[in-house]
Amino acid sequence: MRVIIMAAFAGCLIVGSACAEEPATDRPALWGSPTVDNGACCKTLGEVRSNIDRIDREIIRLIAERSHYVHEAARFKANPAQVEAPQRAEAVVRKAMASAEQEGLSPKIAEATYRAMIGAFIEYEQGVFAAAAAAGKAPWNK
């Protein structure tokens, strides 16, 4: 019996999320007291997730707006080598970490999020340069 249980546990570790459970979304919390909105939210996991989804939509809207400015920034750079701008990237990350601390968010979460986002935007902006080059609009090739 012990071998079967250990094998099942090992299988879960190898497969990962295949053994994860989805919690019920319509039941009250199993422990603790509400802390969001002065204790008014949340009575169920479904309510929590609805609010997270609402916030995620706003985050996506803001990231999309940010992407327009990243695209615009490419016009001011002489060549693709200027896209990464490591000093600027580090300044943005440090500023995000400081803002996170002021807002009650772990600076580590802000740092990881911003590093991933900046990496994705560097790749995006490199694509902007590649598209300009493909269209014959690359001033660094003239």
Image (spheres, helix red, strand yellow):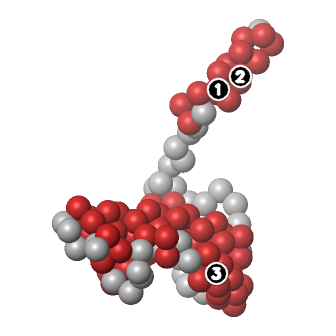
How far is the residue under mark 1 from the one under mark 3?
40 Å
Name the image quarter holding the C terminus. Answer: bottom left
Residue picked out by circle 1? 14
Between marks 1 and 2, how big is the CA–CA gap? 6 Å
Give the image location of residue 122, x and y in percent. Answer: 47, 68
For disc 1, the neighbor class at 10 Å (few under 14, some 14 to 19, many from 20) is few
Left or right: 132 in relation to 126: left
Q: Identify residue type, mark 1.
A: Ile
Label 3 residue SS: helix
Q: Which mark is residue 87?
A: 3
Label 3 vs label 2, nearer the camera: 3
Type of amino acid under label 2:
Ala
Q: Secondary structure at mark 2?
A: helix
On screen, residue 128 above or below 12: below
Determine whether, in the image, residue 124 is placed left or right of residue 111.
Answer: left
Kindly identify the residue that appears in the image at 71 percent across and 76 percent down: 107
| Residue 2, quarter of picture | top right
Query: At 50% across and 49% down in the image, what residue appears?
Result: 24
In front: 129, or 89? 129
User: Which mark is drawn over residue 10?
Assistant: 2
> Which mark lies nearer to you, 1 or 3?
3
| Res 85 seen here | yes
Q: Are marks 1 and 2 in contact (CB under 8 Å)?
A: yes
Outermost left residue: 135
Quarter of the rendering containing residue 141? bottom left
Front position in the image: 124 or 106: 124
Q: Residues within 10 Å of mark 3 (few under 14, many from 20)?
A: few
